[in-house]
Image (spheres, grey):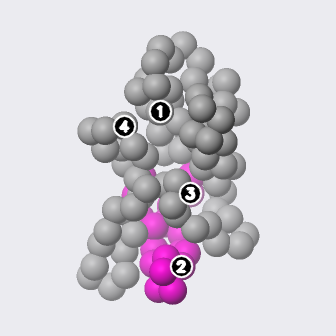
């Protein structure tokens, strides 16, 4: 999966962009999960100007973006969550 996301990508920013594209295409949102003991709904995947993949979490009217690396996944995980796992692996492996 790492190879599929990073094919034809030069440098870390383009590789992160490849993962963002795969996650955005395959991750089924919205889905519910728990962040710091609060049930939230993950509504959107985005990429920051610093090339970090983030999700928008909503609880009532409150919204907050958090890194997808810090996002606790529910059990069972949503469809497409394997791309989050691949991105986390890529991040930890030193790219």
Q: Mark 3 Cα within 10 Å, few/some/many (few <14, many 20+)?
A: some
Residue indicated by mark 3:
28
Query: Residue at 66% across / 31% down in the picture?
Result: 2
Query: Residue at 39% across / 43% down in the picture?
Result: 52
Distance in Å between CA atoms under marks 1 and 2: 25 Å
Distance in Å between CA atoms under marks 3 and 1: 19 Å
Q: Secondary structure at mark 3?
A: loop
**Left or right placement of residue 88 versus residue 25 in this view:** right
Q: Where residue 88 sits: x, y (%)? A: 61, 46
Question: Who comes first in sequence, dot 1 or dot 2?
Answer: 1
Based on the picture, tell me whether residue 44 belongs to the magenta stretch.
yes
- Res. 51 mark: 4
Disc 1 to disc 4: CB gap under 8 Å:
yes
Residue indicated by mark 2:
34
Identify the magenta region: 26-45
In the rendered view, tell whether residue 44 sits above or below residue 30. Answer: above
In front of the other: label 3 or label 2? 2
Question: Who comes first in sequence, dot 3 or dot 4?
Answer: 3
Quarter containing the C terminus: top right
Q: Mark 4 Cα within 10 Å, few/some/many (few <14, many 20+)?
A: some
Residue indicated by mark 1:
16
Question: Who comes first in sequence, dot 1 or dot 4?
Answer: 1
Query: Residue at 47% across / 39% down in the picture?
Result: 20
Disc 3 to disc 2: CB gap under 8 Å:
no
């Amino acid at each position: 999966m790492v190879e599929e996301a990073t094919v034809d990508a030069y440098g870390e920013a383009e590789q992160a962009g490849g993962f963002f594209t795969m996650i955005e295409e395959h991750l089924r949102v919205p889905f519910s999960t728990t962040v710091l003991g609060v049930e939230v709904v993950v509504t959107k995947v985005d990429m920051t100007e610093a090339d970090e993949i983030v999700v928008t979490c909503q609880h009532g009217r409150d919204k907050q973006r958090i890194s997808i690396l810090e996002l606790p996944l529910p059990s069972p995980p949503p469809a497409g969550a394997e791309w989050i796992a691949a991105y986390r692996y890529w991040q930890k492996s030193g790219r």
